[in-house]
Amino acid sequence: MKGRTIMFLGIALVTSAAILGVCWYLFPRQFYWVDEIIASTRSIDIETPTPQPNTLESFEQFIANELNNSQIPGAAIAIIVDDEIVWQQTYGYADLETKTTVTADTAFQLGSISKAYLGVAIAQAIENEYFGLDDDINAIMPFNVQHPIYPDTPITIRHLVSHTSGIRDSLAYYQSYGIGELDTDLGVFLADYLVPGGKHYRARGGFTNQAPGAAYEYSNVGAGLAAYVLEVATQTPFSTYMCENVFQPLNMANTGYFQNEFGPDSVIASAYLRQNMPYGYTSYPTYPDGMIRASVADVALFLTTIMNDGTYQGTTILSPQSAELLLSPVSDVAPHSGIFWEVAVGRNGTRYGHDGGDPGALAFMYFDRDRRIGTVLLMNSDTFQVRTMAFNILNLIFNGEHVPDIFSAS
């Protein structure tokens, strides 16, 4: 009897695995979560080309080979040396069905690179004395946010921007993702998520066991909350604030959070899963944490501005002091985090920036302060092959023996 039970259980497990495998193959969009689980178990082996490219021609050939091998639908890359965009290329298609090619003006999903833009807005608000890093957010907010285990420990701006607030992304956050333009208000969602009695409130799932300021845990909801604090403090909708204080001053005409922020002739790259399955236009209530769409030309311009201490061609969005604060670690327990900017000590220098990903999209924006080189890499696919390709390209740009000399000589 026992043997028969084990046999039936084995058959059930094999059958279930087979059904799951078939569904995973046939329905990439619905079973995207399986791709994410598989990707998390695989390590990326970064290849260093031999010999290393030492001319612009050989560099471009390396990039083209990597892109071709990854079978990516479309991509855009820019390189900045000192305070100048020295190289920019686009590849493939923004839309496979219409055969719309990628151009320098094609807007790609940036994912969490959006937090780097949010960081600039927070640094501006500190510079303009709307609030300080150590201000209690409840002194600004229209509703109180307290850690359920540590209600007497205030959550501050510093905690939010360094991902040390104790706020966690629960299942409700991931379930808030949708296809198409959502109309859920940022403040309404946050109140439902963070205030006891709200429909998304979970004392355990929505908060860590650590007091605010005690430990690092990356939080998209915490980033959304930081944007909402700025929105309340400035009495300006966050997307409007960004347009007026970052996008428009820098003439970033192909950057926005929502489709109605783009002109009728603008092209937004479609997102593709494996098998070139289109995923759709992703949106979510905490849009400041990851919903920017932007062209490679605009992102390169933004990165150049930060590399140049907050100024680009006479337009200043941050003082040098605020630009330095933006990139400086603001918490002892998060030495790798400035004001939503990642800080990483690499083989050849210290790098600053952010990466981002959403279903069918992958993006990188980093610069090396010591070598004075930066890069933007935007893609409309996020398969394992595409991720491997991206890391190979980034490795060459930041660790290549002849970069940035290739571009200085060209």
Image (cartoon, rainbow, N blue to C red):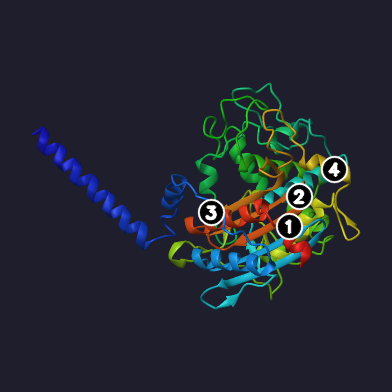
In this view, the residue farthest toward the front is 51
Closer mark to the observer between disc 1 and disc 4: 1
Write down the residue under mark 2. Answer: 371
Marks 4 and 2, the one that precedes in the sequence: 4
Q: Name the amino acid type tagged 1.
A: Pro
Q: Secondary structure at mark 2?
A: loop
Foreground pick, 82 / 90: 82
| Circle number at residue 322 | 4
Disc 3 to disc 2, C-alpha distance = 21 Å
Marks 1 and 3, the one that precedes in the sequence: 3
Circles 3 and 2, Cβ within 8 Å, touching? The answer is: no
Q: Name the amino acid type tagged 4.
A: Ser
Write down the residue under mark 3. Answer: 47
Write down the residue under mark 1. Answer: 404
Q: Residue at x 42, y 57 (%)?
A: 30
Above or below, 310 against 329 in this view is below
Q: Is residue 80 left or right of residue 195?
A: right
Marks 3 and 4, the one that precedes in the sequence: 3
Q: Secondary structure at mark 4?
A: helix
Residue 333 falls in which quadrant of the image?
top right
Counting from the top left corner in percent of width and height, residue 185 is at 65, 50
Marks 2 and 1, the one that precedes in the sequence: 2
Disc 3 to disc 4, C-alpha distance = 37 Å
Q: Name the amino acid type tagged 3.
A: Glu
Closer mark to the observer between disc 3 and disc 4: 3
Circles 2 and 1, Cβ within 8 Å, touching? The answer is: yes
Foreground pick, 382 / 109: 382
Counting from the top left corner in percent of width and height, residue 173 is at 55, 44
Residue 22 falls in which quadrant of the image?
bottom left
Marks 1 and 4, the one that precedes in the sequence: 4
Q: Residue at x 63, y 28 (%)?
A: 215
